[in-house]
Image (spheres, rainbow, N blue to C red):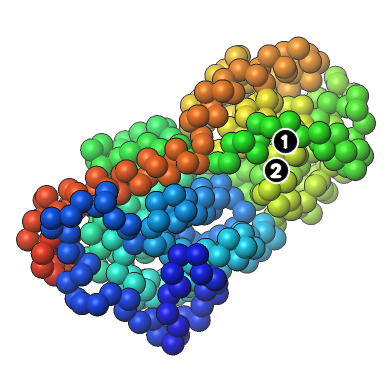
Amino acid sequence: MKDFPPAGSPPMCPASPNDKLPSVRSGPGTRKATSGRSWQTRPLRVMHIITRLIIGGAQENTLLTVEDLIRDFGDTVLLVTGPAPGPEGDLFDRVQQRGTPCVVVDELQRAIHPARDVLAYRRLLALIRQWQPDVVHTHSSKAGILGRLAADAAGVPAVVHTVHGSPFHPFERPWRNLFYRWAERMAARRCDGLIAVSHAMRDLYLSHGIGVPERFEVIYSGMEVDEFVRDRPEAAALRERLGIRPDEVVIGKVARLFHLKGHEFVLAAAPRVVAEVPNVKFLFVGDGILRDQLRRTVAELGVADRFVFAGLVPPADIPVYLQAMDIVVHCSLREGLARVLAQAKLAGKPVVCFRLDGAWEVIEDGRSGFLVRPRDADELADRLIRLARAPELRRRMGAADAEALRARFDHHRMTSQIRAFYERLLEQEGTRNPAAAATTAGPSVHRARRR
């Protein structure tokens, strides 16, 4: 039998799904004992649930939120995640180093698997009932659906979900889109608040009847902005180590080598860019299942000597890699709001990306970068060539809006906004259902309120 660790103690990653998890509160009514005491005057118990802790934007966002809640607000926080297999890398080293309380649920996996998903739901329900959080905050599609259902069934006072990106999109199979839209509508009715990382994501969900406007909050995905802003003299040494000459113009892309990340569009544009700007070099940062396929493609295109595959890079090193680049390109077909757009701008780099989702909320076309038509490799090549030929244009676009973005994407601001959102939802819980404030209320009360 294992007790949950308090904030600041060594993490529990991974934990066996067969562990018995003892209750940590003294009585059956303590979860809802809120009358006469403001949620703002005491620490909260918050459980964050995410499908997997791979190296990625949603995962980094979640981990920063957890760390900030513990450090800045004194909250007791437990991070619950599934395993993170595959070549993309994971963030468990940071979890261990920071002593973040964490439990791995082996059954919580990304792929749809009805039998395993039922087991994951039961495991999450047991965790929630025994840990008794004030807030359950879910992230990503699978954890978002199962976690919200479990939190609602357990009668958690406030259930929150962050929309980092949409699981339904034009490039998914129709039956999957139908299923995901249905599942998201159902799960939205079982939570109190929805956070979108961009206005584009909020508007997309509302347009499909998922959630209602008054329950949505737009909170930009925070990051350690100072790490990207400060000058990185080691970037020159990095370029040399990667075999990049000082006179070469580096077009860089930071993303997992995975489907829908858009590497194929950069490859399609590359031969023309190389033909017109011979001193250009492409730098791919990240790893994934498409690594070998992409390497074969650049060889077939005859531009292998113009590409550098950096492989898996620790998140702490990404600021140096961005400063080693002259232009950042991002062609993902599915993003809520790609964090690398803001990171590139903080590092003073111009960005070329597809005009999709929340990209327009960071990049102003023609001023701080270029927004191109999705899947248009010719327009992509045009914009890359224009920037590669014009050092002054790169400098001017790279400097545009950097200061405003520094304030907007600071992780302390993000966490403060999220914490304030929790408090508002908890106050509403006590106001809307005053009987529940002093007595134990079953899940049916919460379901009636949320719907």
Give the percent coordinates (x, y) of residue 368: 61, 19
Q: Position of residue 158 (x, y in %)?
A: 26, 56
- Residue kind at label 2, given as amino acid type: Ile
Q: CA distance from mark 1 to mark 2?
A: 6 Å
Instruction: Say the numbered circle drawn on residue 318.
Output: 2
* Local SS, label 2: helix
Would you say the residues marked 1 and 2 are in contact, meaning their CB atoms lie under 8 Å apart?
A: yes
Q: Is residue 4 visible?
A: yes
Q: Residue furthest left?
A: 435
Compared with residue 131, is residue 225 higher up or lower down, i.e. above or below? above
Whether residue 138 sits left or right of residue 440 in the image: it is right
Residue nearest the observer in this picture, 89 or 34:
34
Q: Reply above or below: 129 against 250.
A: below
Give the residue drawn at x 32%, y 76%: 24
Q: Residues within 10 Å of mark 1 (few under 14, many from 20)?
A: many
Q: Is residue 66 above or below residue 169?
A: below
User: Quick one: SS at disc 1?
Assistant: helix
Quarter assignment of residue 34: bottom left
81 left or right of 239 in image: left
Q: Position of residue 269 (x, y in %)?
A: 75, 29
Res 169 seen here: no
